[in-house]
Amino acid sequence: MIKIGIGLRNNLLYPFLLIIFTFLRRILAVIISEKLKFKSSLSFLALLMIFAEFITGLVIYLYQTKIITYQKMTYHDSKFKVYLLIFIATFFDFVEYILTSYYFPKFENISKSLDLRLGSALTLSSFIFSYFLLQTEVFKHHKFSVKVIFICFLMVIIVEIGFNIYYQVINKMHFLIIFLISISLSFIALQNNIEKYLLEVNFINPFHLLMAEGLFGILLSIIYSYIESPIDNIVDFYQKNNKINFIYLVICLLAYIILSGGRNSYKLLTIRLYSPMTKAIADFFLNPILIIYYFFMGIDFKFENHKNILFFIINLILSIIIVFCGCIYSELFIVYYLNLERDTHREVSRRAT
């Protein structure tokens, strides 16, 4: 008999808020690119995201130092190593965002939700990095979850390639994009594990870390602006659209800054309190809802300009299974079968009492 329990804890606020901010920001990005037709904006959104990181980290860090007296922090590593790691983490984040949000969508005949559906690559790579770099303990329910998520990840790729072959729209670019998306998501996993190391080993203040990442990100954006100026996107949109659409765009961009600041703040708090795996699971927790949104809004899951219900249903089911297994890994759900519950926090606490 299979029994499922709820492993709710009192400190789930940070992951919950991370899920909400991530979901809302994703929807807002779709509105900006698909509804307002601000197609070339996504490199500009990277700059806004980085600016939000810096401002949020700076404001909250200064507020904390004003109301709380901190002793001068002595890092476990040298300052050079600490800030080098922060720069590396920022660089991986910057490259991943530019690739997945700006360059990948430029390829024709590539599914617009492919990076969303391949999101489990972030979970798998987070698990690998956490296990080998941070020496994280792995129990039976962790191994079970990761195995099922890996199988679903392979099935997403097989289904994607299979349907494109059937409709004769497959080309070498599909394989390249799948590979590059998976690699780019592993960049985020490595970034999150670096952040976990800085937070746990060097005890760096998360908002100091957020501020430093924002500052390094701004420097990278300035360098990148010589390749493609983000300001030109705004000027071009203003010239080609009426004032109402431009006002809508400005409102959406301001909202994007707020959501980015909130998301990145709760990202670091979740990583510090939980793990990079929990953060990765939070990133795709609402993917089934996003997949439904993409389908019914006609943004994706189309072949020959018609919605393919079978393609949509298969991907929806796989995304639900991935989310469910992510909940098992993070112990939100506890499965009382095959002894999977034994090493969960709830059962260990129960045996201790």
Image: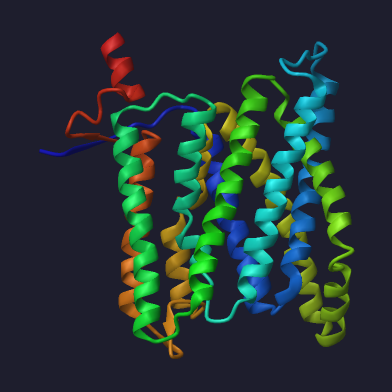
How far from the left and from the top, in percent, is residue 211? 80, 37
Is 186 in front, or is 322?
186
How far from the left and from the top, in percent, is residue 104? 62, 69
Is 84 in front, or is 45?
84
Q: Is residue 159 above or below residue 65?
A: below
Residue 125 seen in the current view = yes
Image quadrant in which the C terminus is located: top left
Res 79 → quadrant: top right
> Is 323 on the left or on the right of 95, as rendered?
left
How far from the left and from the top, in percent, is residue 264? 67, 43
Q: Is residue 330 above or below residue 99?
A: above
> Is 107 on the left or on the right of 178, as rendered?
right
Residue depicted at 72% across the width and 23% down the height: 204
Q: Is residue 249 above or below residue 278?
A: below
Res 224 → quadrant: bottom right
Residue depicted at 32% across the width and 23% down the height: 346
